[in-house]
Structure formats: structure tokens, C-alpha cells
Amino acid sequence: MKHIDEYRDGTAARAYAEAIARITTRPWTIMEVCGGQTHSIVKFGIDELLPPAVTLVHGPGCPVCVTALEYVEKAIEIASLPGVLFCSFGDMLRVPGISRDLLSVKASGGDVRIVYSPLDALRLAADHPDREVVFFAVGFETTAPAVAMAAWQAVRQGARNFSMLVSHVRVPPAMEAVLSSPDNRVQGFLAAGHVCAVMGTAEYGPIASRYHIPIVVTGFEPVDILQGLYMCLRQLEQGRAEVENQYSRSVRPEGNPAARKLMGEIFRVVPRKWRGIGEIAQSGLGLREKYAGLDAETRFGVAHRTTEEPPECRSGLVLQGILKPRECPEFGTRCTPEHPLGATMVSSEGACAAYYHYRRRRS
Amino acid sequence: MCLAVPGKIESIDSTDPVFRSGKVNFGGILKEVNLAYVPEANIGDYVLVHVGFAISTIDEAQAKETLSYLEEIDRLAGVENG
Ligand code: SF4
């Protein structure tokens, strides 16, 4: 397919690996922020093409992985109520709650449906006026505009039986959380291309200068990632710390103004808990007061539920680049995709699942 | 989950700008996509689609530049070495 195949060219990938080896004189650790990039890196073996001096660590950019346990529990509680039709992206169904997941709610008779788009959930609300239709709104800034549109249309259409369990997250505060950790070893970032397609690049300048760290907005195909790494390493070697854009075919500096406008109308910045990591200030998007009528947490009385996370899963360390999945003692033994202890073992973008699928046999 | 796939706009229905939508071709598979966030996109343009929404148009000139970047660094390496 055009705009995909040309970025999977093996000759170009090897040429980039050589160019990277040519300019690298010292050890460097770079984090790719987005789970989609993690998946590409492990699947295509990009890390194995790099000189030993370059270490890649995998970042917190997997919405399935970082959705707080208490939101998974809220989802399970709401989905179990009679009369509720609960809609979710497919990836969330197998994320473990305390004792079960959404899939088991479905298996025991709950009406849990996988939707592709938030607008599909709104359509289900119109088709089932006698049911309460709830959409589990998770995701980064990439997904928030689609949810904003569903919220806006719901109000416009007066859809009284539609609500949303909102647990959106924002990327830049999570990058700062990684950098502020005393155990941080990240020296350069590949920023998440599709988040930036919506939000633009302006948020990253202050991070680059405050922490003196290069940030390269990067795409998802192997050649994109290798080019992003090359640009990041060149900055590191030259002592620069700037925001650069590898993914300029899809990312403009201002992002997508129409999407940002509607996001701003529907959402406000709120503190948000991240699974395994804890609360990060300003790292979430929640519904504005004007749209509070759509809030499933108040509608179903689950707003104040809090949940402690079980200690055996170390996904918080994995998501901050401190621990590699295979260094977790549960990896591949007590924790597998069939019986995940943590969300990073569920989603194909979670680092633990990516290593399990592509690297287990060789270890 | 931030997966977004490039596809080519085949047709546009813009009777209501808010519900501006169209058919987008992903390697032979046609899908209905919301185009409200890409008011500048025309038939024949490539857009990046995420959960049923086009979030960005793909800039062909920038795509070419990205693909020729490798030649550029090889040329630079040649200059530095020679
Ligand atoms: S291997 Fe399993 S238990 Fe260990 S960090 Fe990953 S998800 Fe958590």
C-alpha cells in the first residue's frame, strides 16, 4: 500500500543502520514513546540492527497499558449492570481487573460490544433507545478528537441514553514524568507521530530545553523509526537538544486545528492516574462541566471508587523504560497473554506482549 | 492503539460540513470515513485514518523528501570522508 510499503524497504533500513553506526561514538539510550512504535521495533527487529552502543527503551505510550486499574474496575461494574450496553475498543476487553475482565462480564451475560469508532457507540444508542449505552473512552490525543465528535453529536442529537466513561491521557506530561524519575536513563525521545498529527509539536519545545533532551517526532514504519533514530543520535552526538520532525508528511507544527478546536470545546486538562505509575498532574482529559451530563461515572455512581494496584506486576517500571519485559520475574511464567497479570501483556502494543510474541523463543 | 492507516479519498459527501464524510480506499478495501477534521482534503488525496476519522492529510512533497533523506546523508557522509 502506498505510504506504507516504501517505508518497509529492507535496503533502506540497512543503509540507515549503517549510517547510525557511522555517527555513533558513545553509548546512548533512546525511548520510543508510542506503543505502536514499540510493536514495530520488536516485530521488525529494528533494535537488533543497531550498534550495541544504542539502547532502545520502551515508553508509556500504550493507552491499553496505562488505563488505571480503577477505570477498568469502573468499566466492569457499569458493564455488569442490567440494561447497560457497554461499548469498548477491542483491546480493552482482556485487560485484567482485580478478579476479572470485560470479556468475562460478556461471557456471563453482560452486553459488552466491541466498536471500531466512538460514533458506532452513538449509533447503537440511537438503535436501542430502551438501553443505556456507555462508551469506554480511552486513548491518547490521537483518539480524543473522535470521542469529542461523538460527545458533540450526542448533545446535538439529544441522545439521553448515551454516556462515556472517560479516561483519556496526554503524552507530554508522561514524558516529563519519565525524565523526572530518579532512575531515568532516557537521553533522547522518539515522540509519538500520530499524537503530534493532532496536537502539533509546540508542546515539546519546553521539554527539550528544560531537560536538554532531543525529541524527534517519528512515524511508525521501520524506515521512519530508523530515520528518527538517526536524527536523534545526530543531535546527541552534536550536543543539541531540539524538536525535529521526521514524520513531516503527516505532522504539521500546528497539528490539526479543527480537531484541536473540538477537543478544547469538550475536554479540559485534568490529573490522571496511570496504571503502574500513579497519578501524573495534567496528564488527562476529562469532560468539561458543560458536557458533564454525558459522564458515565456520575450517571452510574462509580466516580469515587479507588483501587490499589497489585504489586506483582512491574509494568510501571517497564513503561518508564527502567525494566525490560524479560527482566520481570513473572514474564512468560506466571504472566502470559493467555493469563496476563498486567495490561502490558495484553495489548499487542504493550512491551511485555511484544516481547512475548516476537522474542520469547530466542531468549 | 494510536494505529492510523493511510488511504486514498475516493468520494466526498459534504452536504453537512460537520458530518463531512467520504469513502476511503485502503489497498482495495473501501471504508466510510469521517472527514470533518480534514476540511482541506480533496478526492485523490491520501489521509491518515484512526478509529473512523481522518486526522491528517498526507503531504506528498514531504513524503518524497523523507524518502530522499537517505541519499542526502549518504552524500554528506561522502563529503565528510572525501
Ligand atoms: S511480564 Fe507481566 S507481570 Fe511482568 S511487568 Fe509485564 S505485564 Fe506485568
Image (cartoon, coloured by chain):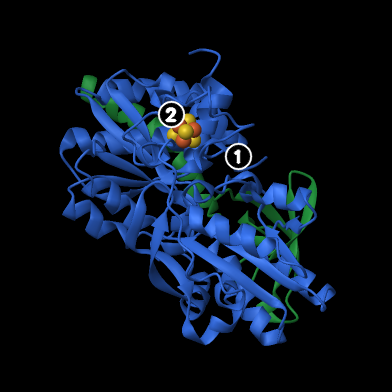
Residue B49 locus on image (x, y percent): 63, 56
Q: Mark 2 points at which residue?
A: A325
Quadrant hosting residue A279: bottom left
Q: Residues within 10 Å of mark 1 (few under 14, many from 20)?
A: some
* Letter of the chain in green: B
Q: Confirm whether residue B82 shows in the render.
A: no
Label 2 to label 1: alpha-carbon separation: 28 Å
Which label is found at residue A4? 1
Chain under callout 2? A
| Amino acid type, callout 1 | Ile
Q: Nearer the viewer, residue B29 or A204?
A: A204
Seen at 56% across and 56% down, the residue is A73
Residue A358 locus on image (x, y percent): 56, 23
Q: Which of marks 2 and 1 is in front?
A: 2
Q: Colour of chain A?
A: blue
| Amino acid type, callout 2 | Pro
